[in-house]
Image (cartoon, rainbow, N blue to C red):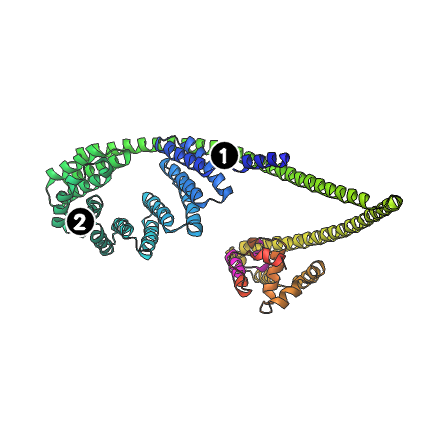
C-alpha cells in the first residue's frame, strides 16, 4: 500500500503542476509585459498559457491568451499576424464560449481592418458584433457598436446610413457623458459630410471643450481638423489656419502629425499661400520618412520576436514530450503496483485455503491431495500455455492480414495519385495549349486537345480500381451500399478515395473538378448519410 501512496503522489505532481491560479498569474504577467512594450517577454508568457490551456481544454484561458497575442502583434504594427491570431480566437469563441468573447474579438478584427483602411471589411465585422449584441439585448454594446458603424460608414461616405446608426447610438448612450461625447464627435463629421456646415460648426464648438483628456486625443484632433475644413469652406482663412495649427500642436504620433500637416497644406494651398503649403508638404515628407523608419524598426523587432518565439515554442514542445514520457512512466508504475497487490492478495488467499485444508484433511490423505493439487496446477499451466499459443497465432494472423490490406491500399493510393498527377499534367498541357492563339487556330492541335479532355473524363480505369479496392477491403463498398442505398456511384467513388486517406485537392484532381466542388461534395455525402454533428466522415467510413 505504501508503494501505491507514493505513485499517487507522483500523479499529483505530474498533472497538477499548472493549476488555474498559476495560469491566470502567467496571463496577467503577459498582459502587463505588453503594456510595458516588452513584446518578446509578453509573447513568451502568453504562448505558454495558450499551450497549457489547449492541453487542458481550458477554452476561456486559451481565448484570452490568443486574443492578447494578437494585441501584441497589433502594437508591433504586424497587422497580418494580429489578424491571424484574432481569427483563431474568434473560432474558439463561437465554438466554445459565449457572446461576450465573440463580440470582443469581432470588435478587435473590425478595428484592425479600419486601421488598414479596409472600411468595407471593418463594417462587416462591426455589423456582426452589433447584430450579436441585439440578439442578446445588450443595450450598452448595441450603442457602442452603432457608434463604430456610424464612424466607419461616414468614412465610406454612406452619410444617411451613418446618420441612422448615430441616431440609435445617441438614444442609447445620451445619459452617459463619457460615451455620449463619442457619438457627438461622430455626428460632427456626419453633418460636415452632409454639407450642413452651420450645424457641424455649432456641434463641434460645443463638443471641443469636453475633449481635453489624453484618452480622447484622437477625437479632439478629428474635431479640430473638421473645424479647420469648415472655416476654410466659409473662406475664413485665419481661423482655418488656427485650428489646423492647434491640431498640429496636440498630434502625439507621426501619423497624426501627417494628418495635421496635410490639413495645413490644404488650407494654405486653397488660399494662395504656396510657400507655406510647400513648407507643410516638406514636413509631411520628413514625417513620412520618420514613420517608415519606425515601421521598419518595428518590422525588425517583429521578426526578432517571432524567431525567439519559435525557439520558445520548440522548448514547449520538448517539455510536452517530456511530460508525456513521465505520464507513460506513471501508468507503467501504476500497472505494476496493481499487479503486485493482486498477486499478494491471491497468494495470501491461497495460503489461507491450503492451511485450512491441511487442518481438516486426514494425515493419510495429505499426499494424495497434494498430488491432485499439483496435477490440477500442471493442467492449468498447460491449458494456459495452449491458450496463449493460440492467441499469439491468431494475433499474428490478424497482423499479417492487416499489413497485407495496408500494403494493397498503399498501392491503390499510389495508383490513384499517379492518375491524379497525370490528370494535373494533362490539365496543365490543355491550359497552356488553349492559351496560345496560334495553336487554337490549328485544327489538328485543337482536335488533339479535345482528345485530351475526353481522356480526363474517361472512367474506364475506375472500374479496374473498384475491383481491386473491393478485393482488398472486403465488403466495405457492399456495407456502404447496403447501409446507405441513396449513395450514387460517384459518392461511392469519392468515399473510396477518402478511405485511402487522399486529401480534398487530390480527390478533386481525380474527379477533374475544383477543390471547392470537392469540398462541397464531401459535405453533401455527409448530409446524405445523416452524419452526426461533429463526426468526421473519414472516421465514420473507417469504423464500418
Q: Is the stretch drawn in magenta largely helix, strand or loop?
A: helix
Position of the C terminus, as image quadrant, is: bottom right
Figure label count: 2
In the rendered image, residue 323, in percent from the top left (x then y), is placed at: 57, 36
Residue 42, placed above or below residue 501: above
Residue 236 in which image quadrant: top left
- For the question of whether residue 272 can be seen, the reply is no
Residue 43, placed above or below residue 426: above
What's the distance in space between the residues labelled 1 and 2, CA to CA? 49 Å
In the rendered image, residue 452, in percent from the top left (x then y), is placed at: 60, 60
State left or right for residue 484 relative to residue 93: right
Decide: marks 1, 2 in contact (CB < 8 A)? no
The residue lying at 80 percent from left, 48 percent from top is 384
The residue lying at 60 percent from left, 34 percent from top is 6
- Count neighbours of disc 1 (C-alpha within 10 A) and say few if under 14, some if 14 to 19, many if 20 or more: few
Q: Which residues are magenta?
A: 506-523
Judging depth in this view, the residue of 496 and 297 nearest the camera is 496
Q: In the rendered structure, does residue 514 fall within the stretch colored magenta? A: yes
- Count neighbours of disc 2 (C-alpha within 10 A) and say few if under 14, some if 14 to 19, many if 20 or more: many
Judging depth in this view, the residue of 282 and 249 nearest the camera is 249
Residue 502, placed above or below residue 206: below
- Provide the secondary structure element on which disc 2 rests: helix
Hey, which residue is sitting farthest bottom in the picture? 485
The residue lying at 63 percent from left, 68 percent from top is 482
Q: In the rendered structure, does residue 187 fall within the stretch colored magenta? A: no
Q: Which residue is mark 2?
A: 192
Earlier in the chain: of badge 1 and badge 2, it is: 2
Q: Disc number at residue 310?
A: 1
In the rendered image, residue 364, in percent from the top left (x then y), is placed at: 89, 45
Amino acid at each position: 500500500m505504501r508503494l501505491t501512496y507514493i505513485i499517487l503522489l507522483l500523479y499529483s505532481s505530474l498533472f497538477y503542476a499548472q493549476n488555474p491560479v498559476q495560469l491566470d498569474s502567467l496571463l496577467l504577467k503577459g498582459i502587463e509585459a505588453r503594456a510595458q512594450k516588452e513584446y518578446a517577454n509578453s509573447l513568451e508568457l502568453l504562448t505558454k498559457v495558450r499551450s497549457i490551456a489547449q492541453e487542458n481544454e481550458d477554452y476561456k484561458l486559451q481565448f484570452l491568451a490568443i486574443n492578447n497575442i494578437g494585441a501584441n502583434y497589433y502594437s508591433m504594427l504586424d497587422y497580418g499576424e494580429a489578424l491571424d491570431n484574432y481569427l483563431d480566437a474568434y473560432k474558439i469563441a463561437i465554438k466554445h464560449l459565449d457572446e461576450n468573447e465573440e463580440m470582443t474579438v469581432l470588435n478587435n478584427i473590425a478595428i484592425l481592418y479600419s486601421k488598414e483602411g479596409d472600411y468595407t471589411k471593418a463594417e462587416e465585422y462591426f455589423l456582426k458584433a452589433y447584430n450579436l449584441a441585439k440578439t442578446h439585448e445588450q443595450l450598452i454594446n448595441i450603442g457602442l457598436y452603432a457608434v463604430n458603424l456610424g464612424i466607419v460608414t461616414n468614412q465610406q461616405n454612406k452619410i444617411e446610413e451613418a446618420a441612422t446608426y448615430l441616431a440609435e447610438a445617441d438614444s442609447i448612450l445620451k445619459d452617459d457623458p463619457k460615451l455620449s461625447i463619442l457619438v457627438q464627435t461622430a455626428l460632427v463629421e456626419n453633418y460636415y459630410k452632409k454639407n450642413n456646415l452651420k450645424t457641424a460648426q455649432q456641434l463641434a464648438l460645443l463638443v471641443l471643450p469636453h475633449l481635453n483628456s489624453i484618452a480622447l486625443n484622437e477625437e479632439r484632433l478629428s474635431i479640430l481638423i473638421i473645424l479647420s475644413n469648415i472655416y476654410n469652406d466659409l473662406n475664413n482663412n485665419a481661423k482655418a489656419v488656427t485650428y489646423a495649427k492647434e491640431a498640429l500642436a496636440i498630434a502625439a504620433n507621426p501619423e497624426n502629425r501627417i494628418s495635421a500637416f496635410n490639413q495645413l497644406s490644404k488650407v494654405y494651398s486653397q488660399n494662395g499661400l504656396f510657400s507655406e503649403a510647400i513648407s507643410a508638404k516638406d514636413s509631411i515628407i520628413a514625417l513620412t520618412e520618420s514613420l517608415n523608419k519606425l515601421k521598419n524598426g518595428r518590422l525588425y523587432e517583429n521578426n526578432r520576436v517571432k524567431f525567439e518565439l519559435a525557439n520558445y515554442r520548440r522548448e514547449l514542445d520538448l517539455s510536452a514530450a517530456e511530460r508525456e514520457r513521465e505520464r507513460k512512466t506513471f501508468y507503467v508504475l501504476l500497472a505494476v503496483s496493481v499487479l503486485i497487490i493482486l498477486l499478494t492478495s491471491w497468494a495470501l488467499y491461497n495460503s489461507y485455503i491450503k492451511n485450512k485444508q491441511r487442518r481438516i484433511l486426514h494425515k493419510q490423505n495429505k499426499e494424495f491431495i497434494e498430488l491432485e493439487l499439483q496435477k490440477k496446477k500442471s493442467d492449468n499451466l498447460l491449458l494456459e500455455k495452449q491458450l496463449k499459443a493460440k492467441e499469439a497465432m491468431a494475433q499474428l494472423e490478424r497482423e499479417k492480414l492487416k499489413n497485407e490490406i495496408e500494403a494493397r491500399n498503399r498501392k491503390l493510393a499510389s495508383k490513384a495519385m499517379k492518375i491524379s498527377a497525370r490528370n494535373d499534367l494533362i490539365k496543365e498541357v490543355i491550359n497552356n495549349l488553349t492559351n496560345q492563339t496560334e495553336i487554337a487556330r490549328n485544327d489538328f492541335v485543337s482536335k488533339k486537345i479535345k482528345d485530351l479532355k475526353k481522356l480526363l473524363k474517361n472512367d474506364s480505369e475506375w472500374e479496374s480500381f473498384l475491383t481491386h479496392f473491393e478485393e482488398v477491403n472486403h465488403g466495405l463498398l457492399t456495407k456502404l451500399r447496403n447501409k446507405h442505398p441513396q449513395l450514387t456511384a460517384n459518392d461511392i467513388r469519392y468515399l473510396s478515395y477518402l478511405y485511402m486517406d487522399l486529401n480534398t485537392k487530390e480527390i478533386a484532381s481525380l474527379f477533374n473538378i475544383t477543390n471547392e466542388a470537392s469540398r462541397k461534395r464531401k459535405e453533401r455525402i455527409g448530409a446524405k448519410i445523416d452524419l452526426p454533428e461533429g463526426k468526421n466522415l473519414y472516421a465514420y467510413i473507417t469504423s464500418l
